[in-house]
Image (cartoon, coloured by chain):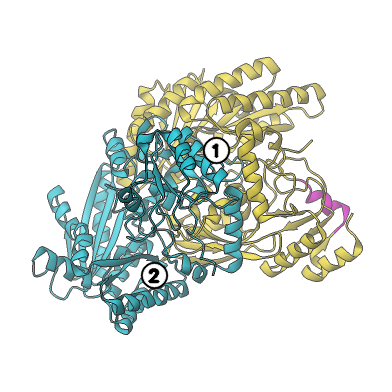
Chain colours: A yellow, B cyan
Amino acid sequence: MLPPSFLESLSAIVGPEHLTTDAESRQAYGTDALKRGVPADAVVLPADTAQVSAVAMLCHKHSVPLVPRGAGTGYTGGAVPSQGGVVLSLERMNRILEIDEANLVAIVEPCVLTGDLQDAVERLGLFYPPDPASLRISSIGGNVAECAGGPRAFKYGTTKRYVLGLEAVLPSGEVIKTGGKVVKNVVGYDLTQLLVGSEGTLAIITRIILRLVPRPPVQATLRATFRDVEHAVAAVIQIVRARVVPAALELVDGESLDAVGRNLGVRTLAPEGTGALLLIEVDGVPAAVEEEASRVQEACLEAGATEVLHARDEEERQELWRVRRELSMSLRMVAALKLNHDVVVPKGRIPQLFQLVARIREEFRLRIPLFGHAGDGNIHVNIMVDPTNADEVARARAAERVLFEGVVALEGSISGEHGIGFSKAPFLALELTAGEIALMQRVKAAFDPTGILNPGKIFPPVH
Amino acid sequence: MLPPSFLESLSAIVGPEHLTTDAESRQAYGTDALKRGVPADAVVLPADTAQVSAVAMLCHKHSVPLVPRGAGTGYTGGAVPSQGGVVLSLERMNRILEIDEANLVAIVEPCVLTGDLQDAVERLGLFYPPDPASLRISSIGGNVAECAGGPRAFKYGTTKRYVLGLEAVLPSGEVIKTGGKVVKNVVGYDLTQLLVGSEGTLAIITRIILRLVPRPPVQATLRATFRDVEHAVAAVIQIVRARVVPAALELVDGESLDAVGRNLGVRTLAPEGTGALLLIEVDGVPAAVEEEASRVQEACLEAGATEVLHARDEEERQELWRVRRELSMSLRMVAALKLNHDVVVPKGRIPQLFQLVARIREEFRLRIPLFGHAGDGNIHVNIMVDPTNADEVARARAAERVLFEGVVALEGSISGEHGIGFSKAPFLALELTAGEIALMQRVKAAFDPTGILNPGKIFPPVH
């Protein structure tokens, strides 16, 4: 528990109405989409960078753990305490400060919802491409802290490609600026890109300068179905060989399709015997889009697609995307707990990843629907668990390690989008050497010498 | 001077034929395109990562400065000693190890020439976009160490956007791997992007995993001329507002045009009274390129272009690019020494940058032709100096500081492409706060605690 004098100092910084210590708030800010975590001892809602700095300075002085938090939608516990302390929620810092059309730049506070930013720039004919599934509920600051991806990452890249500069508060309270409004800047080390994806362990991001691009005027959406995932991946490779870069290239497996079908109460969403489905979207100027869509169609048919649908209008387009949109909700019907792992392998190795998961399904007797971003080789492996079934939970935990080991053996990575947080921290050494982890810890110490900022994240717990 | 026993140990690592200590080699490896530097005490040419590691370990043990070097074409002295020691030239590590067409990835050793890599991937219908002017003579490792740009950066981004993973040797000799073959990886800190642009001060890059894209099938090239730079920049803004992203958007000022004209012995390269010229290239699928080219033409005419030429074939295209290609050589005829500064400002502020340079020209009585990447706001400010004229050299040095201060005041950066090396190190504090510099020095210490790796670079000299 925090001493009363400390709480008084916190209250003096943010104002009493923006400090809470009641049990409900402490619990609410002690959890995120992972649904695990430790309650906060106190929650503060600063109004601006100066207050963030003052809170950091205070926590630093008293060696109190400090956990920055955006919208709290992460899957790895990045925004929740692992050992109590102060949760610093940035929710009041939620303004779009500037959209500079001539320089294709937006400047935002961290708790703008990503979808709101997209709407605002699209009204001006501009485009902020990263599109995590959570975009309507997740904050841009959280997206930056975790380096969020999404379907469009295949063509447009993930969040990091759009971050030009940051304002951030070090654990000492010092305010730094990195990068700026210019797209090229090689003055000193690229601390901007180091902070992107650092999961709130190096500094608290208080302002973000984002690069925008022109909004692509049209999209074409196709849906191709296949007997099995091998054929679907063959189509992905064929599309790449046809030198088309779709804006999205999403893969959904048979088990996921079944779940959506059951949830929607329809017998089937795709031709009988469909083992894998690809959703493909190309975007750009109309003439180019037509040409690319027909090359995609051809590539899918060459790879053995059983059917290729091409949406002709917005309504048809929304209908094709429906299966993908309904996925998360449908899987919730399968089991109460979804261990959602965003593993990634070189895309040519997706079939081997599916074989690995098939072996895991059998060995550990688990339901594991798969879907994800096939273009990037980034597949969401959803281990479905009844949390009241201790044996199933134990089997799921054992399966996780086998999955991660297998992914690393395929030259892949245990996280492509969600980060490590505390839930994947025990597995870090599967992918990184002891020397690489020690180097990262020295980098951490360069920012946070006393280790108060978001402790217990990324690095394996010391036993 | 290095003791004989140290040299014997070096020789044992790389073989006597790959260690040189003669005056000529020491001098040659003690300079780069900046034409300043301190001779090396010894030059080693390791064959592989193991030898690089052994050399680092030896230098570390004996606290001998170690300077990694690619092709030695940099403009800021990044690859040359500032205080003697060992220059480690990676020139023997020059193989393309793999081009993986299905995964759109190339794996290369650091001393592959960038142009050779581009040729190799283009033969397969693929594309490595970064195109520094030095691409026929600079190495990909040097491009990564400095985060090289080039005209195509406006559409495609600079080198950093293409680096997926690295193998690198720490000053201790430890070999680390960062990133990998996958385009998404959020496991731990992004050391890949931290190493890109770190100018050989953190680690020695020994292997590079690069992302490739499909080669755009066609280009269209346009040349637009304007009375003055204000009108040219208005055209750039107009092109952006027309939501076209050209692959290149190059600006050449009147003084540069005059230099090329004199060098080629032609009276003029452009209509009488041309104060600024834009070279614009759009690329993509044919239908889209035609549409975008006509939108570019329209935007230029609306902004007051005096003439817009549109190349109809490869020969015309090469003719339009000729003025840009001849620039460097032509400026060499203007004066023996070119202080080439790659400053960058938000592109809407290019006219203010030109006004600043006009004032500097007058105040310091200097010839300063300007050209550069208008889309990025990255303008090469070339202060032309007769190195035998001490007064002119002094005026040029004084002008540099005024230029850099002015650029920072315009929310710009003192280097967009060339890095800091030692030539710009005294100016770092114009752009970064003392706290930001101290933070970067702590990051440096995380990699290089004893400070043997490329000392005297990036950070301001301590007096």
Disc 1 is placed on an element classified as strand
Mark 2 or 1, closer to the camera: 1
Which quadrant, please, contains the N terminus of chain A? bottom right
Report the chain holding disc 2.
B
Q: Crowdedness of circle 2 by 10 Å Cα count: few (<14), some, many (20+)?
A: many
* Residue under label 2: B348
In this rendering, the answer to whether B56 lies above or below A88 is above
- Of residue A161 and residue A168, the one placed in the foreground of this image is A168
Note whether B253 is above or below A168 in the view shown. below
Note whether residue A318 is visible: no
Closer-to-camera residue (A265/B158): B158
Residue A333: in magenta span:
no
Question: Of the residues shown, which amino acid type is indicated by label 2?
Answer: Gly
Residue B228 percent location from the top left of the image: 25, 75
Q: In the picture shown, does residue A369 fall above or below B156?
A: above
Task: Residue type at mark 1: give it.
Answer: Ile
Q: Position of residue A385 (x, y in %)?
A: 73, 27
Question: Which residues lie in the magenta part?
Answer: A21-31
Instruction: Give percent across and percent down for residue B277.
Output: 22, 67
Residue B326, given in percent of the width and then of the height, sits at 18, 59
Foreground: A294 or A187?
A187
Instruction: Give the residue number, with chain letter if any, for mark 1.
Output: B176
At 49% from the left and 42% from the top, the residue drawn is B6
